[in-house]
Amino acid sequence: MTKIKPQPGIMEIALYQGGASQLPGHNDVLKLSSNENPLGPPSSAMKAVAEAAAQLHRYPPTDHAELRAAIADLWSLDPERILCGVGSDEVLQIVIQAYAGVGDEIIFTEHGFSMYPILTHMAGATPVCVPEKNRVVDVDTVLAAVTDKTRLVLITNPGNPTGTVLPEGELERLADALPADVILVIDGAYTEYAEGFDGGAALAETRPNVLMTRTFSKVYGLGGLRIGWGYGPQEMIDVMRRIRQPFNLSGVQLAAAEAAAKDRDWLRTCVDLNAEQRSRLTDAVRQLGLACDDSSANFVLVRCADAAEADAADQAFKAAGILIRRVPGYGFPEGLRITVGDARQTDRVIAALTNWRTTG
Ligand code: PMP
């Protein structure tokens, strides 16, 4: 028996379940399982990648000044209060590692992002998972779970995989009702798709205990490059900077994200396309007698009658060469999370669903 022991919490970690990208027997696979942008990145970002690739022998800048300036300009924020990471996953990891350890509790909700328990255990802290109400975060339930060991509360908004939004007034009520030493993290990976929601920027701007996290993986089409960022009070960002790896982002990542942040037309194009196709898909799902909340993200959560029906639907999609995501780990054994694609891809999804419902 080995005497070598991992740190507390590590053996509690269940491996992250990523979306598959292969489907044996199909050479025209439509991957709608990871909420990726069907249009990919803007050409400005591709060009910036090629230029940055000429400097691979150089270490990248550690201060991310140009990327922070571009993000700040786009969203009218203070660049000094931005921290960039390897996806928003890393920003979440840094804030958790900086503020929670063994014996501390981290609260999230039953349908929250699946990385939260992993990151909590990585810090040796204890996850506290609370129920939602009708697939929306319930502020009173969250507040009732707070103890003197609570260090952070993590809220996915818009939710993944629900696509629902907790209104800003409720987020504000939560931020203000939390004890002063508890951090509220608003994980806004899908913010850009949610009309009229600022991702928690105003709260992160004005409250001493709110951190907003965002990503270039979704609407900017850069999931493969891994770039995210956080915005919060100066003191919190200064603490987080101390444990961020100095060279966490390569020159290629920085250049691509900076170009994407400056490409406002691309942002508009992608948001508009998503809204159009999301509404088509939602209508079709409902017309076929399946349940589906209005989504404020780039996916819809279809709720079948039960897990067996969801299995059958998943098989029908696979037979049509379409990969969608089953989400039992998020509390929806009956759920199918389908990323919104472009018009042609949506045609294909609707045809497969219709075929399954009418003949399957
Ligand atoms: N938060 C949520 C809610 C997500 O769905 C994701 C991606 N699946 C992330 C954070 C992490 O995104 P990334 O690390 O690519 O920025």
Image (cartoon, rainbow, N blue to C red):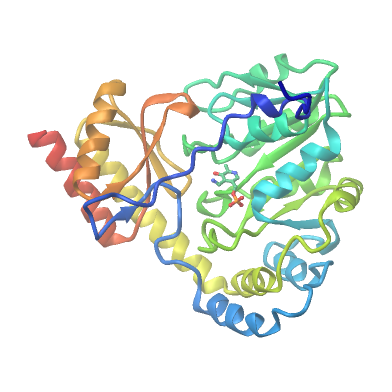
Name the image quarter holding the N terminus: top right
Residue 63 in view here: yes
Position of residue 126 in the picture relative to residue 163 (left or right): right
Give the percent coordinates (x, y) of residue 139: 65, 23
Q: Position of residue 55 (x, y in %)?
A: 70, 83
Residue 301 spot, x, y in % from top left: 39, 36
Instruction: Looking at the picture, tell me which residue is in the foreground, 310 or 186.
Output: 310
Instruction: Identify the residue at image location x=47%, y=36%.
Output: 161
| Residue visible at 69% across and 62% down in the picture | 75
| Residue occupying the far front of the picture | 1
Q: In the orientation shown, which residue stands out farthest toward the left? A: 359
Residue 173 visible (yes or no): no
Q: Nearer the viewer, residue 282 or 150?
A: 150
Asked if residue 114 is positioned above or below residue 179 in the image, the reply reads: below
Quadrant assignment, res 285: top left
Q: Residue at x 88, y 29 (%)?
A: 181
Residue 232 screen position, x and y as percent: 80, 48
**Residue 17, relative to residue 257: is it above or below?**
above
Left-right relation of 239 to 327: right
- Quarter that holds the C terminus: top left
Is residue 4 or residue 308 the one in the foreground?
A: 4
Count the labels in the image: 0
- Is 14 left, or right, of 254 in this rendering? left
Q: Which of the two residues, 123 or 165, is positioned nearer the viewer here? A: 123
